[in-house]
Every structure is written in structure tokens, then in C-alpha cells.
Amino acid sequence: MSVTRRILPLLTTLTVAVGSVVVGAVPAAAAPAPPNSMSSLGDSITRGFNACGWYVDCTSRSFSTGDNASVNAHYLRIRAANPAINGRNYNDSQTGADSFDLTGQANAAVSRGVQYVTVLIGANDACTGSESSMTAVGTFRSNIDAGLNRLRTGLPNAQVFVISVPDIQRLWSVGRGSGSARTAWSLFGICQSMLANPTSTAQADVDRRNRVRQRVVDYNSQLAQACVAYGPNCRFDNNAVFNYPFALNQLSTWDYFHPNATGQQVLANVSYAAGFGW
């Protein structure tokens, strides 16, 4: 589904004046070196689900750890800067995962001893069978904290990149006019919390969609806060992915929910630009 920015400051100068005398200047910490190993944590988006086959994972086209040149994932961009990462790209995400599953995935990343971890999770906490079954915000935060704490204790020197949950209301907006999309959403029961009754303009449906979107906004706020609490080795994408206006032609025509190869490429572009800047 559907996914810019962050240029690391080269120098921060701290001046302390006593009267008119400048006491000192302290440079900011240097940008981290490109990693030589990485793991991707998340759900079916990170697995590349439906990006190259009918209802199957396609990890080669994952925006994060994929090695397909058409997507130009984080892994390939880092490999261009640091060839030592070659072959050390691990996709530890799980199709169907939600925030509760993050700790288990973090354990896998820790066992590999990687230096870089991407985290994109939360769509399945909001995309449920009904609005009432969405994950509560407090529970979501507890799950995220548990997963990030496992990374912090197990990989204390790794760089962790937390990516915002995409705007699933945007998905409804671009797909509601497509008969094929509406059929797929209904037939496969996709994200009914948001996508049920997609053509309805009844106030109850409008309000429901707005509440589901607000839940995603709240999740992203918690992701940002959790990353700050993690410390300097964690970076949040500042809602770059959430704010990106994904288009219908960037979605799989099998389910009109998951990014196709083009969507994965866009997700790679948007997220990488908001990351560590390697």
C-alpha cells in the first residue's frame, strides 16, 4: 500500500557567550557509516505480497531488503555505497503481521546481528474486519515499545528506521471509483474497517472512515514518540510515507491493496529519502 526527506545536518554549532566572549563550538555527531547487514520487519507490504505473483510473497521486490533492480530497494542503494552488505539482506517480516508480532521479528533480527533495521508495521492493526476490532492505541504503543526494546538491547549499535503507516483512507479514495477494486475489496474482505461500503456517502460511513484514518494518525504519532524514546540510533520518517499520495496504478490489480512493483519502487524512493541518507 501505499509511502521524503531528511538531510542530516553537517554541523551544529553551540556557542556560549560570557559577555561578548564566545566560549566554544561543539560539532554534531557524524552521520553513521553505511551498514554491512540489514533486516526488514513488518507485514505483507514489506514481504512484497502480490508484487510479482497471485497472492504470494515477493521478497525480491520488497522496498526494503529486495534485490530486484526495478525496485531499487534500500538494500541495493546501500550496497552501492558499501559492497560489504552483499547477500546480507534479511526479510524477517511476516504477511498478516500486526504490531503484536514485532517482538518476534525483532528476535530474528537480533539473532542475525544486523547493523540496520527497517520497521513498517501497523496497517493490519487498522485494517481489520470491522472498526471495533482495530488495535487500541495504547496496546499498539506497548507492542511497538516491546519490539523496539528488543532491538535496543540486542542490537545496541544498529540503526533503526521506523516508517509511518500509509494513509489507508487514500487507498479508499483512489480505488472507490474502480469496479475492479470494489469487487476485490468485497470478495476478499480486505480492510473492511475502512473499505466496507466504499461508494456510500451516508454520514455513518463517512464518520467511520474518518475514525479509522484518525487511528492511523494516532499510530504514527506513537511510532514517532517511540522512536524518540529509543534514542539517537532510531529515526522516524516524519510521516513521509503516510503523506505520500499513492495512485491506483501503484497497487496490485489482484487485490487493489498491496503495492505492485511500481508501488514498491515508490515506497523505496520515499522512505529511503526520509532515512539515514547513505
Image (cartoon, rainbow, N blue to C red):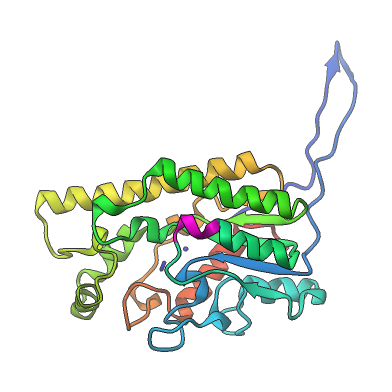
Q: Could you say which quadrant of the image residue 225 lies in? A: top right
Q: Residue at x 42, y 74 (%)?
A: 259
Q: Is residue 182 magenta?
A: no
Quadrant (top left/top right/bottom left/bottom right) for the C terminus: bottom right
Residue 4 visible in the current orientation: no
Using the image as rendered, state which of residue 20 and residue 38 is in the foreground: 38
Vertical placement of residue 226 versus 13, above or below: below
Q: Position of residue 45 (x, y in %)?
A: 46, 70
The answer to whether 220 appears left or right of 152 in the picture is left
| The quarter of the displayed image where residue 44 is located | bottom left
Q: Residue at x 49, y 55 (%)?
A: 164
Relative image position of residue 269 (x, y in whole percent)? 56, 68
Using residue 32 as the reference point, say whether residue 146 is left or right of it: left
Q: Which residues are magenta?
A: 98-102
Q: Position of residue 29 (x, y in %)?
A: 81, 44
Q: Residue furthest bottom?
A: 53
Name the residue nearer the viewer: 98 or 190. 98
Q: Residue at x 11, y 49 (%)?
A: 203
Estimate the x, y position of residue 14 in percent, counting from the top left. Answer: 80, 29
